[in-house]
């Protein structure tokens, strides 16, 4: 199937309130343009440099999401345009985003990445650390970053019950924090292999790469 057919097929299975982020890392800009022509306007990348190059070359009404781990010294390159940073995992990183967003006179939306998988290769913080960050005087003094929700990655496994348990836990974290943080609106969970389960667990933003663009050669 073509990229545009994949997008139409995936979109037709998503409730209207769910945002599809097309994860375009490693794919050439021609592939992104094909998705764009099929109506896709939200793209996600995991490397700042690659995203910035694509931002420069592609139509300006695209919404760019950074879904990968962010090095603090790279924040400045995306601060002028990034729409949502999914994987914030420290106050240090938030401070850097605050600084660069201020320089650009912008408010940058962020998600906190919660560690929900057992494997230690997965990044993220605990629920307690997320609470601590949200309630810190430091975060409260920031006027150019806004934490609008949570992101998580489930264990890569065929064991659907395990994936469901991890996503359900993240939804519980989200609902709990939303009670005291009304800005919470985004729950980013679900990729090509597990987004249907994520939707059943309450996701409202799915990050789908290979099911749209085909298999990647590298990560
Ligand atoms: C690559 C990536 C995805 C998309 O993965 P697919 O399995 O290709 O859908 C989603 N989220 C993050 C953080 C990624 O790095």
Image: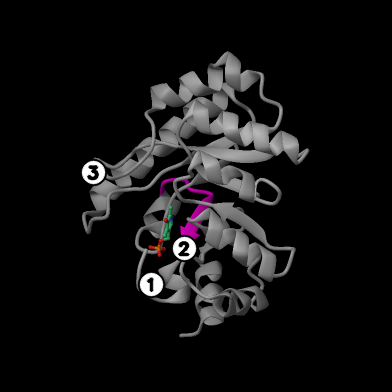
Q: Is residue 143 magenta?
A: no
- Percent across and percent down for residue 114 are 40, 36
- Span colored in magenta: 201-208
Which tag is nearer the camera, tag 1 or tag 2? 1
Q: Which residue sits at x=72%, y=69%? A: 59
Tell me, yes or no, whether the two marked residues, 1 and 3, touch with CB atoms within 8 Å: no
Residue 3 spot, x, y in % from top left: 52, 79
Rendered residue at 54%/73% (across/down): 7
Q: Nearer the viewer, residue 138 or 39?
A: 138
Question: Mark 2 = which residue?
Answer: 208
Distance of label 1 from label 3 (alpha carbons): 22 Å
- Residue 51 lies in quadrant: bottom right
**Residue to which mark 3 is pinned:** 119
Confirm if mark 1 falls within 8 A of ligand 1: yes
Residue positioned 38% across, 37% down in the render: 124
Kindly state the secondary structure of the residue where label 2 is placed.
strand
Q: CA distance from mark 1 to mark 2?
A: 12 Å
Q: Is residue 133 visible?
A: yes
């Amino acid at each position: 199937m073509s990229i545009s057919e994949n997008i139409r097929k995936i979109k037709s299975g998503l409730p209207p309130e769910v945002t599809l982020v097309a994860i375009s890392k490693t794919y050439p800009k021609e592939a992104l343009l094909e998705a764009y022509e099929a109506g896709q306007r939200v793209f996600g990348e995991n490397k700042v440099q690659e995203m910035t190059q694509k931002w420069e070359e592609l139509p300006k009404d695209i919404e760019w999401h950074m879904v990968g781990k962010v090095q603090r010294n790279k924040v400045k390159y995306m601060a002028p345009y990034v729409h949502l940073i999914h994987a914030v995992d420290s106050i240090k990183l938030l401070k850097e985003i605050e600084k660069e967003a201020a320089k650009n006179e912008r408010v940058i939306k962020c998600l906190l990445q919660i560690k929900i998988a057992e494997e230690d290769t997965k990044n993220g913080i605990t629920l307690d650390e997320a609470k601590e960050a949200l309630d810190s005087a430091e975060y409260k003094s920031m006027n150019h970053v806004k934490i609008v929700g949570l992101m998580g990655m489930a264990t890569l496994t065929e064991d659907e019950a395990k994936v469901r348990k991890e996503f359900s836990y993240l939804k519980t974290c989200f609902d709990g924090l939303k009670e005291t943080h009304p800005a919470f609106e985004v729950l980013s969970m679900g990729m090509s292999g597990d987004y249907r389960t994520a939707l059943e667990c309450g996701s409202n933003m799915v990050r789908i790469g290979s099911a749209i663009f085909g298999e990647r050669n590298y990560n």
